[in-house]
């Protein structure tokens, strides 16, 4: 005999709402496992992705990622932490927003230079696309995605900067497109967990609004840091910062962040040109400190009445691709001082003996 149990409509709606909320929370919580899976790290016990981590292709990916990040840790990251503690921390407060324009999805270096920042704002030209359910992807597509991650991270981990064109081409052929896969990998490898992800846009007045709308599109990721029990915000915006294309939304959003600790690395010398004067002025106005290599803001724009400059490493000039942006005044500044050497490469000059690093602190 079949029994029919009548459930009051109000109770049924309540149950469905609870189930929906639980499912949503489950999806959000699984973002950390997605990040760890893409990063080649073990996922949580009982995760739906656990079965995928037993695949030989993923195990090979995990070994490759472990090796690449271990090399980066030895060659770069541990040395930056030592330099930061002795050279940077004594001269700037650590609890400011980290503003990293022209950095693309390079959360790794933003976090290693500013691990105590309450928020990070990154910008690049690369798009933001939602990550699909990995369990629905064919094995071949998933393995191709893992290989694309390894290739895209090759220059970032070995040469400290992204080959933007190559990264864009790699992920255009992948099931996982845009910057989120790289952001996820860096989040996991930095030891952070993902609490929430929101796709957002910037209104013309700089307000952050939910969903992808007209104007500047972005993503907001809330992160938990188990080392400090501090929740952090990570923003990434896809935007053109040239004078003719820069949206008033991102200009006003960034203007309201200050005073910031700003980072510029491998910035293609764009702000040496008049066509990027607006973003150059923005950074000079909103920043309380700027850590950069010579590809960022020209030293001539740091007026001595407003800024104190500290030089590190050595200045041998730009690499061949950017040789037209040689700064004679920077060469003279290095010659007139005795900058402390760097123990890590920074920017386009990979060799630490030819790398330069400038710390500008507002007076």
Image (spheres, rainbow, N blue to C red):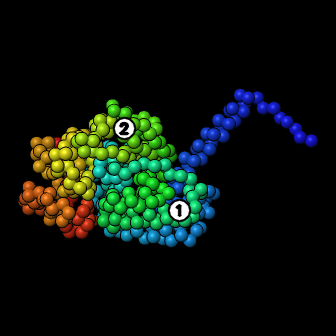
- Label 1 residue SS: helix
Compared with 228, 163 (above or below) is below
Compared with 320, 93 (above or below) is above
Q: Residue at x 50, y 46 (%)?
A: 195
Query: Which residue bears the numbered disc 2?
Result: 215
Please rate how many residues cluster around mark 2, counting C-alpha atoms within 10 Å: few if below 14, some from 14 to 19, many from 20. Answer: some
Looking at this view, is 22 or 360 the one in front? 22
Q: Position of residue 126 (x, y in %)?
A: 37, 51
Q: Residue at x 40, y 68 (%)?
A: 68
Q: Position of residue 284 (x, y in %)?
A: 20, 42
Q: Residue at x 59, y 67 (%)?
A: 54
- Label 2 residue SS: loop
Q: Which comes sooner in the sequence, label 2 or label 1?
A: 1
Compared with 113, 64 (above or below) is below
Looking at this view, is 84 or 63 the one in front? 63
Could you say which quadrant of the image residue 251 lies in? top left
């Amino acid at each position: 005999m079949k029994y029919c149990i009548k459930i009051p409509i109000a109770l049924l709606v309540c149950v469905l709402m609870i189930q929906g909320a639980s499912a949503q929370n489950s999806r959000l919580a699984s973002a950390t496992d997605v990040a760890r899976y893409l990063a080649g790290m073990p996922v949580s016990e009982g995760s739906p992705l656990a079965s995928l981590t037993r695949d030989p292709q993923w195990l090979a990916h995990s070994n490759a990622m472990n090796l690449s990040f271990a090399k980066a840790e030895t060659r770069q990251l541990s040395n930056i932490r030592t330099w930061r503690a002795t050279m940077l921390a004594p001269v700037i407060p650590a609890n400011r927003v980290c503003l990293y324009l022209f950095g693309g999805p390079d959360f790794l270096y933003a976090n290693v230079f500013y691990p105590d920042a309450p928020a990070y704002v990154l910008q690049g030209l690369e798009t933001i696309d939602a990550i699909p359910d990995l369990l629905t992807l064919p094995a071949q597509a998933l393995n191709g995605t893992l290989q694309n991650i390894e290739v895209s991270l090759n220059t970032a981990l070995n040469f400290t900067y992204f080959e933007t064109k190559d990264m864009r081409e790699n992920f255009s052929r992948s099931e996982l497109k845009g910057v989120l896969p790289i952001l996820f990998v860096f989040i996991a490898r930095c030891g952070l967990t993902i609490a929430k992800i929101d796709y957002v846009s910037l209104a013309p007045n700089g307000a952050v609004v939910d969903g992808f709308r007209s104007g500047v599109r972005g993503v907001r990721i809330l992160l938990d840091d188990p080392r400090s029990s501090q929740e952090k915000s990570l923003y990434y915006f896809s935007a053109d910062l040239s004078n003719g294309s820069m949206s008033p939304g991102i200009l006003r959003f960034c203007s309201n962040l200050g005073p910031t600790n700003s980072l510029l690395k491998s910035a293609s010398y764009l702000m040496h040109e008049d066509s990027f004067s607006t973003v150059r002025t923005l950074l000079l106005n909103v920043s309380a400190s700027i850590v950069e290599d010579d590809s960022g803001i020209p030293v001539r724009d740091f007026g001595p009445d407003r800024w104190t400059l500290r030089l590190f490493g050595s200045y041998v000039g730009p690499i061949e691709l950017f040789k037209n942006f040689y700064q004679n005044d920077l060469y003279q500044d290095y010659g007139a001082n005795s900058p402390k050497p760097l123990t890590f490469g920074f920017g386009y000059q990979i060799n630490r003996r030819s790398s330069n690093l400038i710390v500008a602190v507002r007076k």
